[in-house]
Image (spheres, rainbow, N blue to C red):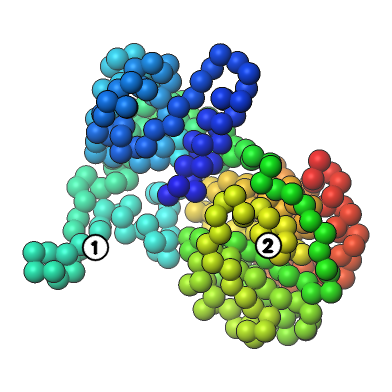
Amino acid sequence: EFNTSRWLCVFPANAINASNTENEAYLLPLEEFEKNTRESQEICSKSDVIVVERNFRFDSLTSIVYWKVRGKVMVGIYDDAFQLIEDSNISAEYWRGRVKTKDAEGKEVIQLIFPPPLTQFEWGLKILHSYTCPSRILVKDWKHVNPNGYYLPNYFETKFYVPKEKNDEIITLWWGGSLSHIESFRNSGLITALESICKERSNVKVKICGDDRLMKFFNIPSTQLSFQPFTPYEKWGESIASGATIGLAPLAGNYDSRRSWIKVIEYMLLKIPFVASKSLSYQELYQYGKFVNNDYLSWKNSILNIIDNLKEKQQIASKLPYE
């Protein structure tokens, strides 16, 4: 959860507070806002605009109305296509209104949430004055509910991204992310491409970072496949800079087309050549790297082309994409 809050709340608040203006931003846990605690009362009453992140539900809806009728501008901010969530996503059942819990005897049962979270989310959008998303398509998805939606891309605190020179004798193909990207791999053709490349090139390794449940989808020798567990964000950029020779950014399907541009921008900030899916999520960045159709050969040929021309591709990555 906090990784989302970092991008949607912490970084914007930090930027406002560092802007050398009279503007100020405060950060408040959603639970405080929902409970209308003394701290929440103090912060909200002196604020002109209140931004609520993602979870428009139950008590947060009550608090949104409470402050709206007191003249505050209420803005929502979120970054997920909850209405299109894939079955493989760990949050899917929740958004469909079903959660696992235990009864009085300790037996696991399915409990229905009423009204369903997606219904509550829609209510929240109707109540809010406005909302922002780091995806143009995600903004359009809910225009019929609230026409006052705005595209606000995710921006970076670039101090966390310092490029590094690497030993290129071993080529590391890098991807990092959460379990919500299973379909990104399954439906892009990238898995087959990586398996083929590793068979043909003994000096190529694949590194997956984040959730080890993704590892079972790869039929790659253990000498060429490695996993890195959760890394604190403050060390995440350094981890990519040290480990990645070539970055990978697969996306596939309607859910993925509503993601933000974070992964590709990270590679650009670190002067790392990358291959990414052609996707509406990345459309604004097409001139800065290699974007491919989602089929096995497109992925394989594009990755091999970078491997075989690595110095040239690294020089290109260190110029316009980085700048």
Tell me the quarter of the image containing the C terminus.
Answer: top right
Q: Nearer the viewer, residue 118 or 109?
A: 109
What kind of element bears circle 2? strand
Say which residue label 2 marks.
248
Say which residue label 1 marks.
100
Instruction: Tell me which residue sits at (14%, 71%) in the image.
Output: 107
Where 257 sits versus 16, above or below?
A: below
Q: Nearer the viewer, residue 230 or 208?
A: 230
Residue 316: x %, y % from top left: 87, 52
Ranked by sequence position, the earlier of labels 1 and 2 is 1
Q: Amino acid at mark 2?
A: Leu
What kind of element bears circle 1? strand
Residue 189 visible somewhere in the drawing: no
Instruction: Tell me which residue sits at (38%, 16%) in the image.
Output: 46
Where 104 sits versus 321, above or below?
A: below
Residue 10: x %, y % from top left: 51, 36
Image quarter for residue 209? Answer: bottom right
